[in-house]
Image (cartoon, rainbow, N blue to C red):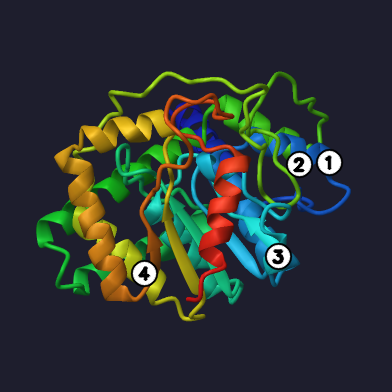
Amino acid sequence: MTILRRFLLALAGLLLAVEAFQQWGAIGPDPFAPGQDRRLARVMLQSTPLLIAHKLRHVVEAGPFDLLIFGDNATLALGQAQLAAHGTVFSMAVPGSSLGSSASLAQTLDAEGALAPILVVLVENFELFTQQVQTLPLRARWPDTVRLLAGSLRDPRVPARDWLRMAARLGKQEVGMWISALRPAAVAEHVKMVLDVPYEVTGDRVWGRYKTDGAGGPMTAARPGLVPVAEALPEQPQVLPSFLAYDLHRLATLAGRPRVVVIELPLEPATAAHYAAHPRSGPQALRKVFIEACAREGLQCALAPVLGVPGEPNSWTDAVHPPETVIAPYVESLLSRKP
């Protein structure tokens, strides 16, 4: 029994050590700093909490920046080169992110005193809008969870039922993140990142090659063409409209009082035309909540336009990831308007 007890204690100690290594956050030199090309190449292989940890640390230590970009992988085409007219730019965009995740990231940077005076927040098109809960690194995640649950509990527009559902999601996500951190592949990639093991990016990746400004590739097709119309984008019945509005409230009440521009990402023109001709009640209801909350909170918001001519060859790689040549001029046009 003594041998078994010792074995179990040793195993528990090992698991705790691995969790501490995985959950601590950014370890080693900043991959987004100049001269860190090998680490920068490995960033795309890190788990989402570790990717966020590296981006958070860079903004805090290398800032202040003039403009920060938030969103998911459909936003990674935007960076310093595209929005240089507004000063220094860094992309906090993270694959799998959503509006709530962006609000959590902004509040975390606000608490660090590292917000830029301009925030561009791009949200998924409401035809496929999701409501992913935040996946911040542990030291930022727990304070953010407390802020989110405490703040939404006091908001009269958040029903108790929605609050309980969000609390359950956060709890489920927390358990999943602790389990996921122990995956051998995730641990191995983190070790390789810390040890600066060389990694060669291969293949044709439209967004995976992170740059020092936090952005990825241009998401532009090699040659003009037509992508299939996405006629069956899945609606997301789990979306809580009250938290869509509350996430906008979080962005509107940041202590640093930055200018916040919230933009619904466009769809490829033929797909956008399809949903304009065949409107669905779920996405339309979310757009109504979005616009009403933006007006109430005094935010500059924009619904997705049709950027291009349906049926004409274009540079889109699929129906939902706008290429740099499309999204950059549109975002620039919104920023050029008076707040």
Q: Which tag is nearer the camera, tag 2 or tag 4?
A: 4
Report whether residue 248 is seen: yes
Mark 4 to mark 3: distance in Å?
A: 27 Å
Residue 316 is drawn in which quadrant?
A: top right
**Is 166 rendered above or below residue 325?**
below
CB within 8 Å, label 4 to label 1: no
Q: Is mark 1 on a helix, strand or loop?
A: helix
Mark 3 packing: few (<14 Cα in 10 Å), some, or many (20+)? few
**Is 148 rendered above or below residue 237?**
below
Residue shown at 27% from the left, 38% from the top = 276
Q: Position of residue 24 (x, y in %)?
A: 59, 52
- The disc placed on residue 40 is 2
Q: What element carries label 4?
A: helix
- The disc placed on residue 67 is none
- Kind of residue indicated by mark 2: Leu
Quadrant the N terminus occupies: top left
Residue shown at 63% from the left, 31% from the top = 220
Mark 2 packing: few (<14 Cα in 10 Å), some, or many (20+)? many
- Kind of residue indicated by mark 1: Asp
Q: What element carries label 3?
A: helix
Mark 1 packing: few (<14 Cα in 10 Å), some, or many (20+)? some
CB within 8 Å, label 2 to label 4: no
Mark 3 to mark 2: distance in Å?
A: 25 Å
Q: Where is residue 256 in the image (x, y as percent from the top left)?
A: 51, 80
CB within 8 Å, label 1 to label 2: yes
**Is 271 rendered above or below residue 107?**
above
Q: Which of marks 4 and 3 is nearer the N terminus?
A: 3
| Residue position marked by numbered label 4 in the rendering | 250
The one nearer the camera, 168 or 258, is 258
- The disc placed on residue 37 is 1
- The disc placed on residue 85 is 3
